[in-house]
Every structure is written in C-alpha cells, then in structure tokens.
Image (spheres, helix red, strand yellow):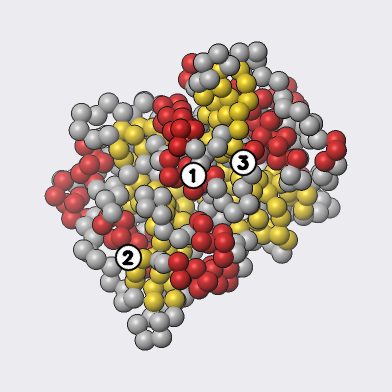
C-alpha cells in the first residue's frame, strides 16, 4: 500500500500545556517532524472566554463542530490551503475517508482496500542513509530502555516557547509498549553505525477495535522521535514506512490514530478539558495565570477539594477485581460506535494500577461486596524547562470510567481527590464517552484545540459525536 506510514502514525494530543496571554491555560497538541499543532487557550471556571494565540498553517481559523456540515466547510478550507501537488501526491492516494466522499451513500462501511498477500509485502527493511542502521529495541533491557528514555526526554514533544517537554517515564514506556501479544519487532530504533548512539525511535502495538459490530485487528503507532540534530536527514518518512512494513508482515491492515491537526477525514473531533489541582504551582511555572479579578487565595479556594473520597467502598483496584472490572467495562463500551475490545488480560495490563503509570479505583458495595463502579487515569508528566524551582509538571489523564451505582459526578470528584492526594498538578479529560456530563460541574475548563480521531483503511459513513466514541488512546 502507498505510504500507509503517515496515517498509521498517531499524533496524540496528550497535550503539553502553556498559558496564553488571555486565558488561564493553553493546550499545545503534539507535534512531530511532519505536523505542528496549534497552541490554543482553555477557558477556566473563573474566566469567561478563551482564544487561540497561534494557528497551524493548514488549519487557520478552522472551528470543528461534530456534524457533517462543519466537516464539509472544513474540507473546503483544507483543500484551499493545500497545493495541488500536496493533494494529489498524498491525501488523495491514501486508503482513508476522503472529504469528497462524505455524502456518497453508495460507499460501504468497512475496509477501503483489501489486504495484500503477505508474500507481496516487502521482506527486507527499507534502506537508511549509509551512516545509520536499524535496530530492534528490547524495552526489557534496562540499558536500551534508558537510551529510549533519554532520546525522548531530550528530543520529543515540547511547546513552541520551550517551556515544557513530555517526560515519559521508563515504566510508562514499558507499559505502553508491552500489551498482551505485542511484537518486539515493532519497537524500532535507528543507531549511528560508528558510535552505536540511538538517534531515532518509532513503535507499534497491536489492538483489537470494535467498529460498530465488527471486531478489527489494528495497529497503533507512536513515539516517532528523531534527534534534533538530525531533523534534516529525512529519517522520519523511512522510519514510518519501515514500521508499516512490519505491521503488514503480521497481516494487519487497519489502524486507529489521533492528531491535533485536520486530515482526511476525522471520524470524530473531541475537545480536551483541564481541571487545576495545584493552581499555585501552575501559575508559578508560567503554565497558567490568575484570572481577571481573581486573587491567589480566591483561586486556591475555588479549586479546593475534600481531603478524602466520599463514596463508601471507594478503594484502589486489586488483581482480584480484574474479572468484575472487565465485565463492567465490556458492557459499558458496547453502547459506543467505536471502542476497544478488551478481555481480562487486556484489563489486567491496561487498567490494573502501576505506580506512577496508571491509577485505578473501584467502588465495592459495603453490603454485597459487588464491584459496581470504577475509574482510572494515567500519568504523563512534562519537564519544566529552565525554571529555578520546579522541574516536573505532573499531569493525570482521564482513562476509562464506568459508573453504574455511583453518580458519575461523584465518582469523578473522588478521582480528582485521589489525584490530588498523589500530588498531581492538573487533571485532563476528553469529552468522549459520558465525560461531558461531569466536566463543567467539576470546574474543568475547555480547551479551544481539538483532538481528531481517525481510522486508517476503514470507512465509517457518518461522522460520530464525541459521546459516541468509547476510545482513549495514550
């Protein structure tokens, strides 16, 4: 297939934050060598409005509303900003939904192109420039994992003003890259032949996704990183082609991915919301600022939380809870058009708590001891660059939540309390699933930037609303 590569790549808007001049928070969506997402402001509870302070060159003045008419308008603007060569050589050659096909009722849902026989997939790795060589990165090796960590922590995503940079822990990387059934060969590095220095990295993991009633094997590709001094060497395209080749060799032809920029064609567009947990620190490091007519004491009072969770039976998830949590999660996710298909092994890996990686809590009925509800969030800190006192911004990201007996607002407030107890500075959530029902009440502020979800080589006829999506990608 022609350059499946770029569409497999998931530019997740996990978000580095920076304040804009006119609002309390700013959202910087993930950038890479290929795309740079906008910095966008976020309205906080005490501030009435927000505005973008920078726009991507290909998405200027684009307002995403989740309906087909807005996608039509978006399509026209995107087409106007792209040259003919860009349109014909890239967007229109890929097996992805095209803007022009949105209202074509004759196009069926499902795979856009059939799979290629494995025997016809390129069997040898793509050629690198002579100075470099491919390596498979064993993330179970402490030395290799440390190399990957150092490469990412010094060269991965940071904001335009060089104030914050993602700081994935080694434990997080191992967790993210070792799901059940992972392929070691999909963890790909590039070394300098002479020094053996690791200078580039890209990964893939397998996933099962339910799209309506169909269970589809997919790939998620992540962590594309090239050393800053080598950005002119054009390593990224060949790296993406190489991970694509290895994905094809496992007979996988679809992918789910996200981007902070508009590509053909989102299956839905979501918004990040942000809840301050440590406003004094956020203001001190330049991450946020005092709102109009707000003092520090008023701000601290506004975001103050109880000292401990209030729901009876709210406790940390344990291994013995995996079957019950799996049943709750599988039943809950059936109501969404696109969602992961998770079994007990998946839940044990992705949801069971891991220190400084993922936190999960269940509600156990004091009377029946039944597990009735659960919530989870994962840890993705950012390095604070050049600050004399603070070096890490600790952010929690809402993951999967199921509330059957406990009101969702109460359950998520307990999650905020648990995050505050663990010294998180901010709690972030997308408006997917039922999240929209608790965001405003719990004093989250909406970001202006959008996170767009895509499926590669799989067509969905109708644009989904965010609450029709049951998927959170790391």
417 or 460, which is in the foreground?
A: 417
Q: Which mark is residue 184?
A: 3
Please name the residue shown 71% across and 55% down the image.
216
Q: Which mark is residue 266?
A: none
Q: Secondary structure at mark 3?
A: helix
Q: Which residue is mark 1?
A: 174
Q: Which residue is mark 2?
A: 414
Q: Secondary structure at mark 2?
A: helix
Please name the residue shown 53% across and 20% down the image.
196
Q: Is residue 195 positioned above or below 330 on the image?
A: above
Q: Quadrant of residue 34?
A: top right
Q: Secondary structure at mark 1?
A: helix
Looking at the rendered image, the quarter that the N terminus falls into is top right
Looking at the image, is mark 1 or mark 2 nearer the viewer? 1
Please name the residue shown 63% across and 38% down the image.
186
> What's the distance in space between the residues labelled 1 and 2, CA to CA?
28 Å
Q: In the picture provided, is 346 more to the left or to the right than 298?
A: right
The answer, for residue 64, to whether it is visible in the render is no
Q: In the picture provided, is 412 more to the left or to the right than 205?
A: left
Q: Position of residue 358 (x, y in %)?
A: 42, 54
Which of disc 2 and disc 3 is earlier in sequence? 3
Q: Position of residue 82 (x, y in %)?
A: 65, 26
Which of disc 1 and disc 3 is earlier in sequence? 1
């Amino acid at each position: 297939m022609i350059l499946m590569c770029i569409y497999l790549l998931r530019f997740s808007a996990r978000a580095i934050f920076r304040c804009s001049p006119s609002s309390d928070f700013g959202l910087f969506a993930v950038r890479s060598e290929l795309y740079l997402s906008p910095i966008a402001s976020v309205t906080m509870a005490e501030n009435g409005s927000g505005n973008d302070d920078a726009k991507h060159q290909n998405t200027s003045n684009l307002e995403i509303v989740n309906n087909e008419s807005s996608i039509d308008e978006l399509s026209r603007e995107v087409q106007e900003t792209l040259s003919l060569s860009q349109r014909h050589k890239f967007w229109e050659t890929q097996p992805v939904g095209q803007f022009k096909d949105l209202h074509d009722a004759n196009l069926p849902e499902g795979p856009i192109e059939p799979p290629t026989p494995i025997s016809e997939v390129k069997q040898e790795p793509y050629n690198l420039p002579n100075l470099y060589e491919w390596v498979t990165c064993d993330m179970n090796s402490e030395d290799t994992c440390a190399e990957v960590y150092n490469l990412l922590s010094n060269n991965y995503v940071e904001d335009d003003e060089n104030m914050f940079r993602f700081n994935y822990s080694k434990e997080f990387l191992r967790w993210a890259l070792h799901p059940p059934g992972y392929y070691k060969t999909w963890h790909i590095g590039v070394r300098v032949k002479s020094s053996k220095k690791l200078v580039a990295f890209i990964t893939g993991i397998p996933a099962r996704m339910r799209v309506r009633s169909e269970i589809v094997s997919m790939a998620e590709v992540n962590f594309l990183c090239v050393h800053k001094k080598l950005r002119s060497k054009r390593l990224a395209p060949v790296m993406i082609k190489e991970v694509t080749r290895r994905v094809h060799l496992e007979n996988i032809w679809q992918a789910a991915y996200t981007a902070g920029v508009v590509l053909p064609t989102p299956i839905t567009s979501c918004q990040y919301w942000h809840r301050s947990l440590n406003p004094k620190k956020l203001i001190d490091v330049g991450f946020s600022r005092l709102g109009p007519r707000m003092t520090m004491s008023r701000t601290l009072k506004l975001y103050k939380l109880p000292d401990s969770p209030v729901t009876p039976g709210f406790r940390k998830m344990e291994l013995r809870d995996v079957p019950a949590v799996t049943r709750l999660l599988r039943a809950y996710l059936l109501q969404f058009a696109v969602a992961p298909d998770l079994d007990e092994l998946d839940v044990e890996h992705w949801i069971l708590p891991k220190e400084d990686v993922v936190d999960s809590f269940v509600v156990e009925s004091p009377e029946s001891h039944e597990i009735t509800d659960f919530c989870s969030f994962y840890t993705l800190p950012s390095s604070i660059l050049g600050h004399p006192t603070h070096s890490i911004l600790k952010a929690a990201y809402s993951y999967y939540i199921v509330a059957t007996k406990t009101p969702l607002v109460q359950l998520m407030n307990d999650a905020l309390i648990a995050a505050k107890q663990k010294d998180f500075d901010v709690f972030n959530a997308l408006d997917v699933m039922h999240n929209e029902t608790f965001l405003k009440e719990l004093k989250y502020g909406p970001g202006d930037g959008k996170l767009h979800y895509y499926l590669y080589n799989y067509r969905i006829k109708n644009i989904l609303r965010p609450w029709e999506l049951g998927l959170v990608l790391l």
